[in-house]
Amino acid sequence: MTGAQPLPALHALAGRFPTGFVWGTATAAYQIEGAWNEDGKGESIWDVFCRIPGVIEDGRSGAETCDHYHLLDDDLDLLADLGASAYRFSVAWSRVLPEGRGRINEPGFAFYERLVDGLLQRGIRPFVTLYHWDLPQALQERGGWLADDIPAWFADYASLVVARLGDRVRDWVTLNEPQVTAFAGYQSGVHPPGVKDTASALIVAHHLLLAHRAGAAAIRAASSEARVGIALNLSPAHPASASAEDGEAARMADGAGNRWFLDPLFGRGYPQDVVERYGEVAPPPLEGYDGALDFLGINYYTRNIVRAAPGTKLGFEPLPPEGALTEMGWEIYPDGLREILLRVHRDYAPRELFITESGAAFPDGPDGDDPARVEYLESHFSAAADAIDDGVRLRGYFVWSLLDNFEWHLGFTKRFGLVYVDYETKQRTIKSSGRFYRQLATAGR
């Protein structure tokens, strides 16, 4: 196969990871499940947002997508075939609570119970994400993430899910990439609800942190065995030049993109330098706040290069990426993964770290030959191993993604999967990268 690695080199790479290392893949409910209105499921904000003309690149939606809801057993078999020891998936809030609160939808819970049971039967450890961007539309109509009550709504939802699955699931991720929920949904407006207002984005970010804390407490109250984490999208911020101005720009980019969530979650409150830049729109202090994390998940895709931009609110602007790019236009920069892992380990000392997402989009064809992704995975796994060699407590790596899927506002125009999906027939084809991953994970286990 094109892109195959010599077995001695592959086994040498696998041997750099410790015994018990978690070999995982990851997905999100709205991106793969389909069945958007079946068996009592309520609408999510993405169901509604996708109907707005022009907001999705190809004009499509996740209404059907990979049809994982109906092809669950096939996809569980794929996971086993790939040699995964863990699977990170998300629960669709509106599938189990159609109005977001109150009435429980039993068929929805039955689906996730069947998913968890199927994983355990195949020897695969479930990591459950409670929120991956698909808020019930009924709660959006009550204010959504801008509502003061939403941390309590989220905690109630978390309590119900853990009460049903907590006897079989130990590892819980409260929120996936709260930075994206807040700033893509409420500042740039490319995600629902499509708001473009920095003050609103900062309120949402504040409420997400409060929801994490309330949700973590609810999870632990429902299950004494639970381990609680959160998944943050983190990227090194590099200055465009050696000038003091660009250095300050990189510090501010790091503050807005990384420290804005890291600092509060590790008991430091909001970073004061960024608070001062935001001025009157900055949120209130997080008095006595701590994320109480058992583990931190890092989603890594690329680095950011920035330069000083004195006329902007935060004083920086991104530059175009350098070097080889993925189809998303993101620079392929594996050393950034090592860098961000070392930085978080050094500055925050989390108990455990997981790479909860890392992957790449390339223009894959139905033959499943994707040598560029094989090379991407090899280089990024190697960077992760370098971080472990340097003392980072990295416990697992979840490749994004198991399947090609609905890529949010980009529709079906980008493919991240280890498995190719024909969206018309739903046929799955394991790609070269999936076969590489199977060899690496099997050797690592």
Image (cartoon, rainbow, N blue to C red):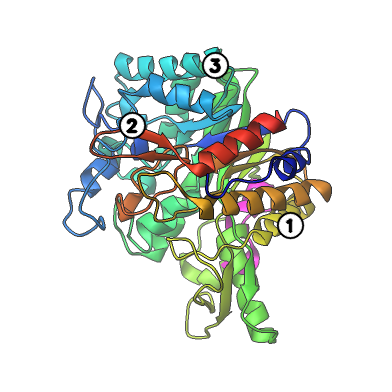
Task: Inspect this view and state whether residue 240 appears.
Answer: yes
Compute the Cα span from label 2 to label 3: 20 Å
Residue at x 36%, y 42% (from the top left corner): 405
Q: Is residue 317 above or below residue 168?
A: below
Number of the label disc, if any, that sits on residue 343: 1
Q: Which residues are magenta?
A: 259-274
Decide: marks 1, 2 in contact (CB < 8 A)?
no
Specify the amino acid type for callout 2: Glu
Measuring 52% from the left and 83% from the top, which residue is drawn there?
Answer: 309
Q: Quadrant of residue 166?
A: top right
Q: Which residue is mark 3?
A: 122
SS at mark 2?
loop
SS label for mark 3: loop
Disc 1 from disc 3: Cα separation: 36 Å
* Magenta span dominant secondary structure: helix
Q: Earlier in the sequence, mark 2 or mark 3?
A: 2
Horizontal and vertical percent position of residue 131 = 44, 37
The percent coordinates of residue 157 (x first, y second) are 42, 27
